[in-house]
Amino acid sequence: METTYRSNIMICAGTGCVANGSLKVKDALESELIKRNLQKEVKIVLTGCNGFCAKGPVMVVYPEDIFYQLVKPEDVPHLVDEHFIKGRPVQKFLYTPPAEKNTIPVMNDIPFFKHQVLRALRNRSLIDAEKIEEYIARDGYMAAAKALTEMTPDQIVIEMKKSGLRGRGGAGFLTGLKWELCARVSGDIKYILCNGDEGDPGAFMDRSIMEADPHSVLEGMIIAAKAINAHYGYIYVRAEYPLAVHRLQLAIEQAKENGLLGKDILGTGFDLDIEIYQGAGAFVCGEETALMASIEGKRGMPRAKPPFPAVKGLWQRPSVLNNVETFANIPPIILNGADWFASLGTEKSKGTKVFALSGALNNIGLVEVPMGIPLKTVIYDIGGGMKNNRKFKAVQMGGPSGGCIPSSLIDTPVDYENINKTGAIMGSGGMVVMDETTCMPAMAKFFLEFTEDESCGKCVPCRIGNKTLLSILTRITLGEGREGDIELLLELSQQIKDTSLCGLGQTSPNPVLTTIKYFRDEYEAHIKEHRCPARVCTALVKFVVDKDKCKKCGQCFKACPAGALVWEKGQVAYIDPAKCTKCKSCIKACRFWSID
Amino acid sequence: MAKLTITDLKKIKQDYHQGLREGGFRVRITVHMGTCGIAAGARGIMNTIMEELAKSNLKDVAITTSGCAGLCSQEPMTTIETTGEPPIKYTALTDEKMRKIFAEHVVAGRPVKEYALVAGHETTY
């Protein structure tokens, strides 16, 4: 049951106020309330920015609506005593926001910012990625300093396990456990590896972190290296990310010059060297064993596990590979503690996740939200809803390895367990949002074209299975689908999943399986009725205007580049088959689905 | 540069906050230059700001860059911070808009409402 509080203290946790110590004020308030036995009467809530950053830390007390400014931790006992025991507001901290300045909306007014909580992206838009001092000024390398001087490898592992941080690259394996497995293996040479081979279509969160905050990745790697006792590391980045490579390289050089990498880091006696390895852009190299083969100079192909990389990884040595976003999450966990990290999220998915929003949304971009946020909030509030007021149809999560989540499941909380239940995966966090103009079999075909192309060819199920899946999907979209094709797709998909060597093949049928699960009627329309309900598959579109549906608006006439449309004001449109080039401009322009 | 110690880290942090926020600069302009920003024309915006700054002869304005600000579809973006005021984010910039913002916000201290998206800092806890 919800407890009713007599007062709520809303403390600003915007970057400005946090920099001015608002979290310390919050801690002081919490302990003071407990001391006065008021913790059941007064609730503390962290809020987004109020826009009064210069007066920070600021807080508002409800229900009285009293605005306090410039509160310091040492003022808290007096403030609690006066306000919450004696019931009189403290004049010294009172602030009246000037009314006329409120015309530009603040962060809390705009859904895109309001629902976001920045942890992995904590330095976004605040620091110059090419200046190490700016990173240090935002507590940079303080977590590494703490890990190197105050913590044993065991303590780091315990803290990480307690935090519940799971790998942000896709599979969601517990980071602390991965480190523990490697830390237990004896061996004088170990490797710490960073996976920056972000290859999912529609995912760009790792690129953004490497570009905007490269030192956060390096610092995470230093902490991990200490935990497993590694002294050498690689960052595997695809060569298609030139700006990320440039900024990481610069960050490594600056860190070395300042004694934050190399020998005797921060005078603690710990050594770590990090080097960048540029990948040539093969999707399979995001798979850990293929990535390691690629660094060794071999063809990027996965191998069977076990032995797991924690035991035999790069150059047959014990290795830990984590994703860019995972590393960026680590420094604040070490600085603020596991409990702080686990305070956000759901039972098994802690903290926040960065998502790359793309597709048919109004707001395209990079967002970081607490785990467990409803999908609906991400799409309609943060994403600003559908572009051109089209209808939301589905969202593809996890790229080609993931699956689609249909509109009927839009209330799904976004965390590892709940997303997996739908048949999609969290993946690296790409969300491609689709509206009613997307054909689901064609979408599945698009992703299969990608995986068929990216399959390394080592194992038969993936090499031949995906090719066969693609050929069946191709004939369906060409209107040549046969009775039994759906069943064949399902059976073959299951076999590919069960028998493929690595994650690529084990997940590549997911787009097929989920589109059949949720949009089987579209497959049936293609196969049995030779009809593409979304009017995407050109071979199945007749390019005939439906007289009953046509609203005589002439939008198709204006859009046609071939002069094939015949229309006059107040008249039903007509498409001249002799001139029509089947470019679908008219279908895109028609708002009434009147062209079949 | 000499190798840093933990005491040096703390000192850099302290010096940095005093130098940039309180002393010297009245205005700090950040151009968001991730791949998305650059692709949308952030370099041109940066050049425009430099030109305007040179013309204005102002000595209390700092120009800096940072990565993606999150709202890639609204790039190019800048954030302008004046002492004692919350930072203001401007979106979908063009050279003309930027010149107007420079004249009104940077020089005269009046934020340009019609181009501003939001005031304040993002939540980071």
Image: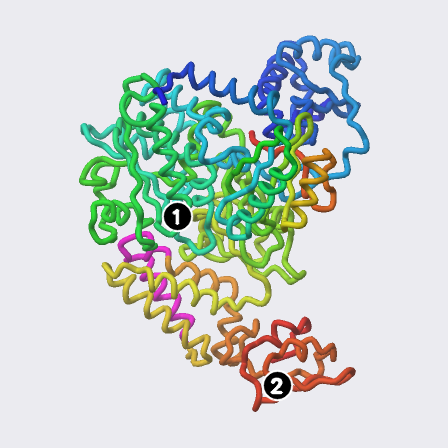
Dot 1: chain letter: A
Q: What residue sits 26% from the left and 49% below the top?
A: A290
Tell me if residue A326 comes above or below residue A16 in the rendering.
below
Q: Quadrant of residue A69?
A: top right
Dot 1 falls on a residue whose secondary structure is helix
Q: Which residue is mark 2?
A: A564
Q: In the image, is A545 to the left or to the right of A127?
A: right
- Asked if residue A48 can be seen in this view, the reply is no
Q: Which residue is mark 1?
A: A242
Q: Is residue A506 magenta?
A: yes
Considering every residue shown, the one lying at the far bottom of the view is: A578
Q: In the image, is A316 to the left or to the right of B100?
A: left
**Residue A330, percent across and down?**
42, 30
Q: Is residue A375 magenta?
A: no
**Residue A484, percent across and down?**
41, 75
Tell me if residue B42 comes above or below residue A27 in the rendering.
below
Q: Are marks 1 and 2 in contact (CB under 8 Å)?
A: no
Dot 2 falls on a residue whose secondary structure is loop
**Where, quadrant-wise, is the N terminus of chain A in this rendering?**
top right
Magenta span: chief secondary structure: helix
Dot 2: chain letter: A
Tell me if residue A296 comes above or below residue A32 in the rendering.
below
Q: Earlier in the sequence, mark 1 or mark 2?
A: 1
Q: What residue sits 23% from the left and 48% below the top?
A: A293
- Asked if residue A567 can be seen in this view, the reply is yes
Q: In the image, is A42 to the left or to the right of B13?
A: right
* Stretch in magenta: A484-507
Would you call the spot at circle 2 few (<14 residues within 10 Å), some (14-19), or many (20 or more)?
some
Considering every residue shown, the one lying at the far right of the view is: A99
